[in-house]
Image: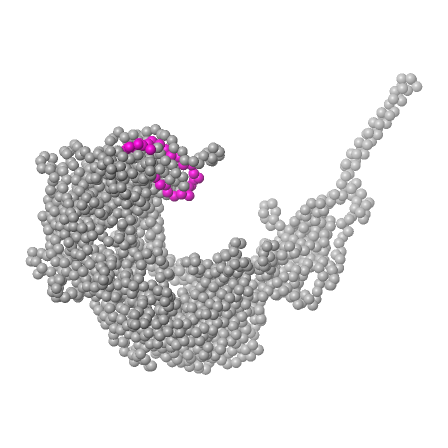
Amino acid sequence: MANMKKAFIGENKDLVDPYVQVLFAGQKGKTSVQKSSYEPIWNEQIIFTEMFPPLCKRMKIQIRDSDKVNDVAIGTHFIDLRKISNDGDKGFLPTLGPAWVNMYGSTRNYTLMDEHQDLNEGLGEGVSFRARLLISIVVEILDTASTEIMSTTEVQVEQIQNISEYVTGKMEEFFLFGAFLEATMVDRKIGDKPISFEVTIGNYGNQIDGVNKPTMHRKKKDGGDGDEEESELLQNSSEDEAEDDGDLVSVSTTPPMKPVITDRNYFHLPYFENKPCIYIKSWWQDQRRRLYNANIMDKIADKLEEGLNDVQEIIKTEKAFPERRLRGVLEELGSGCNRFVTLANKDQNQTGMTKLDRERLKSCMRELENMSAQAKTTRSQVKKNTVKDKLKLVQNFLQKLRFLAEEPQHSIPDVFIWMMNNNKRIAYARIPSKDILYSIVDEESGKDCGKVKTVFLKLPGKKGFGPAGWTVQAKMELYLWLGLNKQRKDFLSGLPNGFEENKAVKGPGLQSFPPISLTYIMKQEFQLRVHMYQARSLFAADNSGLSDPFARVFFSTHSQCTEVLNETLCPTWDQLLVFDNVELFGEACELRDDPPIIVIEIYDQDTPGKAEFIGRTFAKPITKMSDEHYGPPRFPPQLEYYQIYRGNNIAGDLLAAFELLQIGAAGKADLPPIDGPTDSERGPILPVPMGIRPVLSKYRIEVLFWGLRDLKRVNLAQVDRPRVDIECAGKGVQSALIQNYKKNPNFSTLVKWFEVDLPENELLHPPLNIRVVDCRAFGRYTLVGSHAVGSLRKFIYRPPDKTANNWSTAGEIIVNMEPEPPIKKMETCVKLDSTSDAVVKVDVPEEDKKEKKKKKKKGEEIEEEEPDESLLDWWSKYFASIETMTEQLKAQEAAAAEAEEKEDMEIAAEGTEIKPHESHVKGSKGKEKSKDKGKSSKEDKKKKQQQADLLEKKNNKQKIDELHVYNKELEQECGNFEDWLHAFNLYRGKIGDDDDNVTDEERIVGRYKGSLCVYKVPLPEDVAKEVGFDPNFGMFQGIPNNDPINVLVRVYVVRATDLHPADINGKADPYVVIKLGKTEIKDKENYISKQLNPIFGKSFDIEATFPMESMLTVSVFDWDLVGSDDLIGETKIDLENRFYSKQRATCGIAQTYSIHGYNTWRDPMKPTQILTKLCKEGKVDGPHFGPGGRVKVANRVFLGPTELEDENGLKKQTDEHLALIALQHWEDIPRAGCKLIPEHVETRPLLNPEKPGIEQGHLEMWVDMFPTDMPAPGPAVDISPRKPKKYELRVIIWNTDEVILEDDDYFTGEKSSDIFVRGWLKGQQEDKQDTDVHYHSLTGEGNFNWRFIFPFDYLRAEEKIVMSKKESMFSWDETEYKIPARLTLQVWDADHFSADDFLGAVELDLNRFPRGAKTAKQCSIDMVLNEQELPTISIFKQKRVKGWWPFVAQNENDEMELTGKVEAELQLLTAEEAEKSPAGLARNEPEPLEKPNRPDTSYIWFLSPLKSIKYLVCTRYKWLIIKIVLALLLLAMLGLFLYSMPGYMVKKLLGA
């Protein structure tokens, strides 16, 4: 409304009624309104009462203009509480100021409506200074005990006293100087009216509002626990400031100048040698120290960022030693941090510092000291294999530095540069004042202070968002300097030399006046050569998924275009653009070191309309002066990659080189010659000259077209007749048309090729584009999707190294499979000479050794550990394999640690070698090192020996065949089975600009399956001359047919682990759903109740036709009683790649060949047949089976066993074991060899599309595939979960002994116990059983003859008892629990009236418990304490055990003590046996137990009263009785005395 009044009245009076509003944690507080004031003073504090620490992270402070109709925001500032506090242990509570904060918003244009009002509300980047506000924030933690505090949470406003005017620092006079060296790329939409530039700092320099010198007597204020404010708003007084050093009037605007046309999009301003200048004087509180500290940290961060980009570039281009560069970066970081600490130390005690300044300084110094130390330790950990991890870690340092460098307390406002046209503000740039602030210490001055900087102007507010913000409004070359007026003597020192100053005023005092313009007398002429070679991975701007790109190059006031190349995302322009007679001002040597930048913009040419912007990049040319030689190392320049940006997104790369050549006195004759005419307007297009352009060779690119998969609809229409177009470097090939995508999505012609010229340097290879189009009627076609293969490297054919060991064909190499002393697992790599025919000992898979051992042991007595064959099932194999997997993982970790140690030594050595003055010491070091090596090799041998021993033990221990358990997807293990068939994701056509937030996943519209092979023409002779070489297939020899094929797919789902809970009770009721093509199998009725780790143990058979049905989805759903079932997670498997892989992923190769039992061979083809087939397909000589267990494949001879045992134990001769050994070592076979997939279980993550990227659990499973035109496979392996077996455990408690005595007998006073024994199986506490009570045992002996009977269900292989019970009365069904088989026996003391006393217990693990002692005497507490060392027995093997076991309990010191012994007999029977010979509980029928012969001490007082009386009289109450008798005698005597006394008295008196 202020604007409105201004517009109507047209007067410059104080027209705002400001108040301050503070929003924090949902509460709002306001100050009072100051009427008609541009410099209001409030001195009020706003108090918020809130819980601490607050959940709200920022506070919004807004100056508003009070108005009757609606209040308008003048400026907004946000305070981030994380920046004004520190929650560490040495942290501080939020605190701020008293300090000025600057507010930015819209420009002050006095129109009725302000189109940029949002900026004043704090949305978007402010484009103009609005106000400063003096605030402070204090936090006090209140005492929560006082109730009145807790109840008053409303916001309070209080008056406070004024504060000293110097509290925010001393007022200083600052001087800002700017020189405009160039203004180009001015958008032509602006129109050709004269253009000027205005520079403002705060309100100084603002022509519309004018400036004033600050009044020094302003009242300030102080802070309680809230914020108090005063502000200096839109100042309004345009008197010129008078100065001590003469009348220096600020010049903040350049003179208007008419723009000149550069090209169809841009103007430039013809400054030529006259460069306009501006200068402004302004007054601010001197708080430069804050900005200096921020600058030092910014510079450290910039250096770090540059270093990290270098490291990433080294990794990306696969250059050597990225770890060395990273170590260098960390060293720089460490020294930078230390330098900050020393510089910051000086201003610990500076005046005018607020509490926040002091605390921030302390915490920054602490953080940077820590960072320096961390950088040091990280540096020592950077290894070849850890570079990427450490790089991430160092990026955290960078984020921390950037956070620390942001200063929450402002001082000098930012500088704004506005482009004015016709007195209207068009576009702006905002430059932080700290970037151009001067300091005498180099590290403290701003990064752009006294330097020429390129600035791009942008549109204000919403206009600058989205595509409009990508266009450049103007490109400026600017020189800025900001510092104290008294330090300004060097303010011109950073400008390019060779100018004269033009002053505004003639007369005295001229020296101190800054120039209003500079005239350059030094001028250099240059020729710029731009070598535009190619761009790659450009943004797809057309609906066809391609673009028609051309590039426009701007340098100084010149611009040129390349030609337009149609329909490509990787244009190879191969064009030289020559800019003649480029005039640059300044000294030649300065221009050589810091030439101006070149801007390259890439556009998409649309025929009807104008060009569409694709992206922009910047480059600096390499400069050659006229007196320099044109030659190595700098010339000719190398082609380099420049990233193209579109807004903030990367939109491709440009491969180009730029050279700036000075034209000397002799003119252009001295320049290196150009082939062809240079008149670019009429002449032909110039190619990039030799020496710069890459050396090209003719390559042939062969393309294997296999098929298309999962194509989505295009514009709602289904894809029916797709075709694939391949394009690389302007050449290409098209696939055959798929006639009916639904019926058969494979191509009829498999291999096609095209020839293309590619650079020899593989890094410069252009990407290859794959486009899929759908051919419609009338010759129309629609783009379905595209894929850019960024690097052709992995598809380049490299002829095999003929010297490699596995290429040798001379001499036989014998691989012996007899059990030798075991060799460490990790060392299986065997070096073989080309002529060697030695017998080489290869590490034999443990299983083979086991097989041998079994055979050897047949004659010997079988050990106790020998597993019972009848008990072994698939699960035994599985659990044994999991054990092996964990051991292997441990071994790998140990090996990795060892390798790291070795590298540590190398790094240390590297560190020592850097210092040259230690060279004389080095010799001795070397010797020491070799000694160390000797030592370490001995240690290695020791280690190996230990590992071999371990292995030996393991081999002796178990003899179970194993399979391979992968703890990841099989695809990860085997490179997605892309050994010859690759899958390329197709992405949606045109990339919309609103798709920035769309993930790659969502853009996928299908997959193209095929492959590429790139090789130099002509084809190597040895390949072409090979037997059976089919020229139609080129390099893709031996590729199977891609006609549809019927396959039986057998999916085994073993179990799921760590499922995401789906029900309220934190559990799930999972079941499996399998989907392949149109077939869906739901196993809903077999859901598993309340389990997050369910064992499914299921196999499913599905018949499918590849390629139509090749994507298998295995899902796990959660069963719900009401409502639909929820998907927990799913995993998708591409069966086709597995089926066709050379690694034979159809059915895993087992470890041993067996025709019966748990390890029956499950492939319909026997090992011999598989081996024969592989040899035939790979054109390998063999297999030749020889006598004595030999088989020869190519030049490898395998030795092994030849006997096979059937289920009856009969042995017969067979070659299958030999063939299997050859298959297991198939990767050693020359040329055709590759690792074959073993029998396995893979672990696949379960994902849910609604929760992308978060694993919902893991599924263990595997898939077998059998083509239906082959022999049918046998029945599926039974992997159903083991059914528990019913057992009955009978425990007879015969006697106890030495049970501690708890009670004192009332009558007899003896210590005794009323003993009974209680027993139960773990998990069945509610079914506990008690013996009868042996009363009044005086010796701790108890006789019971009492039988407990515990029926239970038991899983023999897992050694667990299985129980099913409902969790609660509301449960729908029972939950299954697996519990270790443990018997607990306890001894108690029975009490009649109080609770029974617990005396002791023993817990026996029924699988391994110590054998009972023969007698009570031999039974000791050691049987419990040293259980591990004693021989153990299993009730499941022994069936019946009798003996003594100790009862133990904890005493007051928590130590175990013996509290009794029990003689028990344990007998285990199966349910059937128990039924045949039943037994009664307690002493009942059948098989009753006789009554115990208990001594009759129990009722002793009742049975022999005399004895008891004697005990009572003689022992217990003897003295009491004596005392009572004496007392009675005394009483009797006294009574008699009293009785007879009167008689005697009378007698005496009467004298009788």
Using the image, determine if residue 1428 lies above or below residue 1023. Answer: above
Magenta span dominant secondary structure? loop
Number of disc labels: 0
User: Is residue 846 visible in the rendered structure shown here?
Assistant: no
Q: Position of residue 650 (x, y in %)?
A: 29, 57
Instruction: Examine the structure image and report whether residue 35 is included in the region drawn in magenta.
Output: yes
- Residue 1492 left/right relative to 716: right
Q: Residue at x 35, y 61 (%)?
A: 1003
On the picture, is 805 further left or further right than 883?
A: left
Q: Indicate the quadrant where residue 1139 lies.
A: bottom left
Q: Quadrant of the C terminus?
A: top right
Residue 478 in view here? yes
> Which segment is the magenta one?
33-61
Give the x, y percent position of residue 567: 25, 66
The residue nearer to you, when weighing 462 against 444, is 462
The spot of residue 849 in percent (x, y) is 48, 71
Q: Residue at x 77, y 37 (%)?
A: 1519
Q: Nearer the viewer, residue 1165 or 1010?
A: 1010
